[in-house]
Image (cartoon, helix red, strand yellow):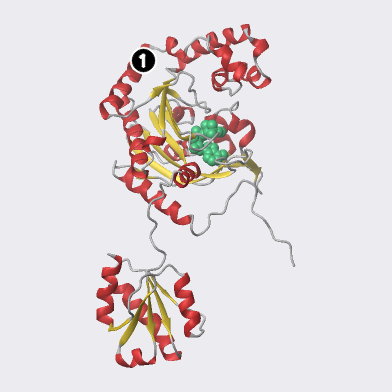
Amino acid sequence: MAKQIQAVRGMNDCLPGTTQIWQKVEDTLRKTVASYGYQEIRFPIVESTDLFKRSIGEVTDIVEKEMYTFEDRSGDSLTLRPEGTAVCVRAGNQHGLLYNQEQRLWYMGPMFRHERPQKGRYRQFHQFGVETYGIASADIDAEVILLTARLWQEFGISEYVTLELNSLGSNEARALYRDALVAFLEQHIEHLDDDCKRRMHTNPLRVLDSKNPEVQAILVDAPKLSEHLDEESQAHFQNLCERLDAAGVKYRVNEKLVRGLDYYNRTVFEWVTDSLGAQGTVCAGGRYDGLVEQLGGKGTPAVGFAMGLERLVLMLQELDCVGDIRRNADVYVAAMGDKASIQAPVIAEQLRNEVAGLRVMVHAGGGNFKKQLKRADKSDALVALILGEDELAQGKVTVKYLREQKEQITVSLDEVKTLLQALIA
Ligand code: ATP
Ligand code: MG
């Protein structure tokens, strides 16, 4: 036998049974963002490598070690998108959607990062994201957070997620803070691990979210970002908190929340859960007022978030919050004899025409009565419609109930339509 080829490590197939859950999640996401007036944007999976280097930052985990970068046949350096925000800005700039305009956009699709695969962390994963442009005030920060809170409600998992919130201040304030932090870290250099020592000079704020307990112990006495915030950012953050309070959205201010991407300023937030073990962040976002300009556009304030769909689906499964899944088939049509077998798909088409939303599966591949009924039973249909020579002659069908103890009946086609309508109502 030929050797089977396996999927690439960290890249998952999504099989029937699970695809239904994903479809349901995607439907809920689409409906919810639509209820806020957001519009979908779609962009390519492959982009110039420079786009991510210039936006996410050269010394971030993503750019340093996680990107799928390759040279194409023309020698251009391309990268499978590791995230959507930079791509959204690139597309917005390119098509003139951003400057002097307001946009409330969303996207959904696969992202790629070369990480060590584990539960909740994959090399191809999916994000649902929202990006808004042209609004500098905290009302829009509050709106995108409110939207995420509504999503948790829709999915029935509100009680399992908590919102962590912080402000990174203006770029100037952050630069001042960075100096203060580096000075502090230099005094404690003997307690820092290699990763932190390196970051101390390249991206010192990232030291704050080191997972190393020894480093965290030192950080207790580190200067605080909140003490370095500029006045405007302080007011912005207060206004955001006021709005969340008014809307009844609970949050925890986490001064160490800095996020791993360079482009954020002011608001940053994460929704975290204990239901997933180590990979506890389901959704993360913030404000990135400088990015549009940094990528060659004209200054445009922006705020958004991205949600990891594998983690969301895992949560729904583990918390038993998947809910009802629509049956794959309501009706299975079986036919006895050549004539009936030719007529069966014709009747099925009529049923699909006349009973909105009905899912009709027609037996294929021949076989005797027993085999066909076995297939009917294996499908998740509620009833089998049996079409034999007698039924054909009388213009009738026999309805056999597959999931309940009920006598089978032979009825006219009109009657069967009414019966099926009631069945799926
Ligand atoms: P983490 O700290 O878990 O690595 P991150 O800060 O790299 O997350 P973002 O770039 O902010 O994550 O992406 C937003 C969301 O996308 C994350 O909160 C998570 O739910 C999801 N996500 C990120 N990387 C992965 C991955 N490799 N596999 C699955 N989901 C992911
Ligand atoms: Mg990461």
Residue 267 falls left or right of residue 124: left
Residue 37, x across and y down, in percent:
29, 42
**Quadrant for the N terminus in the image:** bottom right
For residue 395, what is the image quadrant? bottom left
Residue 109 or residue 193, whichever sits in front? 193
Image point (28%, 44%), residue name: 35
Q: Secondary structure at mark 1?
A: helix
Q: Is residue 82 visible from the viewing direction of this image? A: no
The residue that label 1 is drawn on is 234
Q: Is residue 50 visible from the viewing direction of this image? A: yes
- For disc 1, the neighbor class at 10 Å (few under 14, some 14 to 19, many from 20) is some
Image point (37%, 69%), residue name: 330
Residue 153, x across and y down, in percent:
34, 40
Residue 310, x across and y down, in percent:
50, 44
Residue 411 falls left or right of residue 270: left
Amino acid type indicated by mark 1: Gln
Residue 176, x across and y down, in percent:
49, 10
Residue 267 or residue 102, whichever sits in front? 267
**Quadrant for the C terminus in the image:** bottom left
